[in-house]
Image: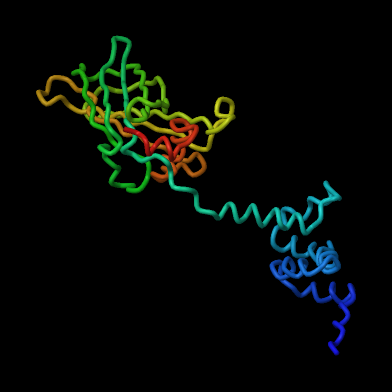
C-alpha cells in the first residue's frame, strides 16, 4: 500500500524558514500552494528585504497602508531591471539625415551649409559623440566689425520626409580672422509633452571666422554643431543623439519608415 503524503509544515515553520530565503527563492516557494503563498507573503518577511534592497520604497506603506511589502519589492525590482536594460538601436542613422545651417544679418544671409549626415566631420577630440563640423559657403565680409546675426540649424530627413529645427537663435559674432561665436539652446522633451516641458539635452553651435584667401576681408568658414546633456554638460553619444531625433522625425514607426527611405 502507498504511504500517505507527509503532513504540510505548519505556517509558523514556513515563516521561520522563509526568513532565511532570498527574494527569488521566496517567490518560487510562494507558488507551491495557497498556504505557502500566504506564509511567504507576510510583511514581516518582506519588510527587511525591502528596506535592504530599496530603502527609498520602505516608507511608502505609511502613505498606502494597503500596499504589501512584497508588491513594493516587485515594483522596485521591475524598475531597476528596466533601468539596466540596454536601449534599442536607433531607427535612424546619420546617412538618413541632412544638416542645414544658415547665418544671416539684417542685410541678408552671410553663410550657409547643407551637408548629408554621413559627410560631416566628426570632432577629433571627442570621437563617438554627437558633435560635427561643417564647411560653409558665404560672402566676404568687412573685417573688424561685430554683427548681430541670426543662426538656424535644421535637421532634415532624407527625401524631405520630415524636418526638425534644432536651433533658432540671435547673437553677436565678431567678424575678425580667428573670431568665433557660440550659441546654445535647450531642446524640447520628446513625446506628448514636448511643447511644454524641457528635456535634459541642449544643442550648441560654434561659428568660426577665417581670413579670405585674397586677404581682403573675412568669411564664415566653418560651423560646429552638437547635442549636449545638461546634467553634466558633456556631448551625448551618437546613438543617443539619433534616438532623440527619431522622436520628431519618425514619430509613428521609426524602424519601418527608416527602412523604406528611398
Q: Position of residue 95 (x, y in %)?
A: 31, 38
Name which residue lies at 72% across and 53% down. 56
Figure quadrant of residue 246: top left
Apparent side of residue 208 relative to residue 29 in the rendered image (left or right): left
Q: Residue furthest front?
A: 1
x%, y% of residue 146? Answer: 30, 19
Vertical order, 212 against 65 (above or below): above
Decide if residue 216 is on the left or right side of residue 204: left
Quarter holding residue 225: top left
Question: Where 76 sits versus 200, above or below?
Answer: below
Answer with left or right where residue 46 lies relative to residue 79: right
Residue sticking out furthest to the left: 214
Query: In the rendered image, which quarter contains the C terminus?
Result: top left
**Relative horizontal placement of residue 197, taking residue 122 as reference (left or right):** right
Q: How is the image coloured?
A: rainbow
* Viewer-side residue, 213 vs 227: 227
- Residue 81, percent from left and from top: 60, 56
Query: In percent of the image, x 73 and y 58: which residue is there?
Result: 73
Image quadrant assignment for residue 214? top left
Report x, y in % for residue 9: 87, 78
**Residue that extends furthest to the bottom in the rendered view of this protein:** 1
For the point 41% across and 46% down, the residue is: 237
Closer to us: 159 or 103: 159
Number of numbered discs on residues: 0
Q: Nearer the viewer, residue 204 or 199?
A: 199
Q: Quadrant of the N terminus?
A: bottom right
Residue drawn at (32%, 31%) of the image? 98
Amino acid at each position: 500500500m502507498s504511504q500517505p503524503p507527509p503532513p504540510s509544515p505548519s505556517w509558523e515553520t514556513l515563516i521561520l524558514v522563509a526568513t532565511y530565503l532570498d527574494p527569488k527563492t521566496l517567490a518560487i516557494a510562494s507558488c507551491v500552494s495557497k498556504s505557502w503563498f500566504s506564509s511567504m507573503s507576510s510583511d514581516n518577511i518582506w519588510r527587511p528585504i525591502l528596506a535592504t534592497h530599496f530603502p527609498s520604497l520602505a516608507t511608502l506603506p505609511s502613505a498606502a497602508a494597503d500596499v504589501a511589502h512584497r508588491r513594493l519589492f516587485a515594483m522596485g525590482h521591475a524598475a531597476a531591471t528596466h533601468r539596466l536594460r540596454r536601449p534599442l538601436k536607433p531607427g535612424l542613422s546619420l546617412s538618413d539625415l541632412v544638416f542645414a545651417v544658415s547665418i544671416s544679418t539684417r542685410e541678408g544671409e552671410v553663410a550657409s551649409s547643407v551637408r548629408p549626415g554621413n559627410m560631416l566631420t566628426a570632432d577629433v577630440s571627442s570621437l563617438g559623440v554627437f558633435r560635427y563640423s561643417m564647411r560653409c559657403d558665404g560672402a566676404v565680409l568687412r573685417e573688424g566689425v561685430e554683427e548681430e546675426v541670426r543662426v538656424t540649424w535644421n535637421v532634415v530627413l532624407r527625401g524631405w520626409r520630415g524636418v526638425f529645427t534644432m536651433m533658432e537663435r540671435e547673437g553677436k559674432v565678431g567678424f575678425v580672422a580667428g573670431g568665433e561665436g557660440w550659441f546654445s539652446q535647450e531642446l524640447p522633451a520628446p513625446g506628448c509633452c514636448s511643447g511644454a516641458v524641457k528635456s535634459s539635452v541642449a544643442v550648441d553651435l560654434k561659428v568660426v571666422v577665417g581670413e579670405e584667401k585674397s586677404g581682403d576681408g573675412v568669411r564664415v568658414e566653418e560651423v560646429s554643431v552638437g547635442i549636449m546633456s545638461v546634467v553634466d554638460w558633456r556631448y551625448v553619444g551618437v546613438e543617443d543623439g539619433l534616438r532623440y531625433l527619431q522622436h520628431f522625425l519618425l514619430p509613428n514607426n521609426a524602424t519601418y519608415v527608416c527602412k523604406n527611405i528611398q
